[in-house]
Image: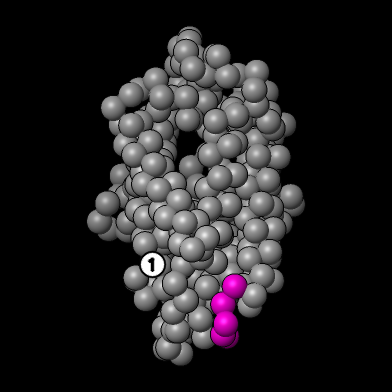
Amino acid sequence: MIVFLIRNFIHLYWILAVLLFFLKTFSKTFDEFTYYGKFLPSTTNDSNRPAPFLYRIFQKYNVPEKLGWISFYFIGLITTCVCFIISPFLFHYVSFSHSSLIISVLFAVHFVRRIIECLFLQVFVDRRMNLFNFASGLSFYFFLTLGNLVEFQQRVSISKIIVGSLIFVVASFLQCYSHFILFGIRKKNTRTKSKDSYYEIPHGGLFKFVSAPHYLCEILIYFSFLYLNRLRSINFFLCFVFVCANLSQRSFRIHHWYLNKFDNYPENRKKLIPFIL
């Protein structure tokens, strides 16, 4: 009964997350309030543009961006480990052919990789994350990993395990390589005084085809989780819809940001999907 209630509460969380995302499309103020990274008001092309009203209100409630991202992956890793340990006590029979345990292993790999990248590769400029974005990130990774525990346990065939894991590994490698390219550009330019000069046109890897390959890879990583649940998990389906919508919007925004900033930006480079979109 408790597992049933938790499962439905998590489904409600993802529905609310999707609704809040679509609220951003109707409210420019709320949309700007959720900005982070290069889209914060201080780093937009219009330097005279005032910060959004909500941003000014919550500006004093913030954390360093680096601490925020590390906290997200750390809470995901801790929740994954706890769920992995207690799962045998919640279900009479579990094995590594069950989807939740396989995904728990992939979660741990993903979170450890991202923590290492944040600590040793990624160069964070002097930016801060407002309290809303910080709480949203923490809740996202907490409910993502908790939802994996309370979903119905499904046996997965060896072929699906191989295919799903292969999608995860390839997407993770390509995402890591894309991050390495971006981090290299940022690290090379951190000593410049102007924040706008931190950026260059990235080249190499999937950047040859799209402006945001790291987001494309992130979508594929979450698809691998859904695939390993035999495309039947409500939790991972709703999460996948949210991730697709959120990262698609951000990749479109990044693409137009590059076009406005660099006159020589490659015309044949797509936003998110090579040769298509």
Query: Can the viewer see residue 92?
Result: yes
202 with respect to 258 (left or right): right
| Segment colored magenta | 90-95
Check if residue 93 falls in the magenta segment.
yes
The picture places residue 26, in percent across and down from the top left corner, at 28, 27
Name the residue at the right extreme.
Answer: 120
Work out whether 96 lies above or below 226: below
- Which x, y percent locates residue 115? 69, 54
Residue at x 63%, y 66% (from the top left corner): 83
Q: Residue furthest bottom?
A: 158
Q: Nearer the viewer, residue 7 or 100?
A: 7
Against 5, is 266 above or below? Answer: above
- Quarter where residue 173 is shown: bottom right
Between residues 180 and 143, which one lies in front from this camera angle?
143
Q: Is residue 246 visible?
A: no
Residue occupying the point 56% across, 60% down: 145
User: Which residue carries the number 1 mark?
Assistant: 233
The answer to which quarter of the image holds residue 126 is top right
Looking at the image, which residue is at 74% across and 50% down? 119
* Amino acid type for the residue under numbered disc 1: Ser
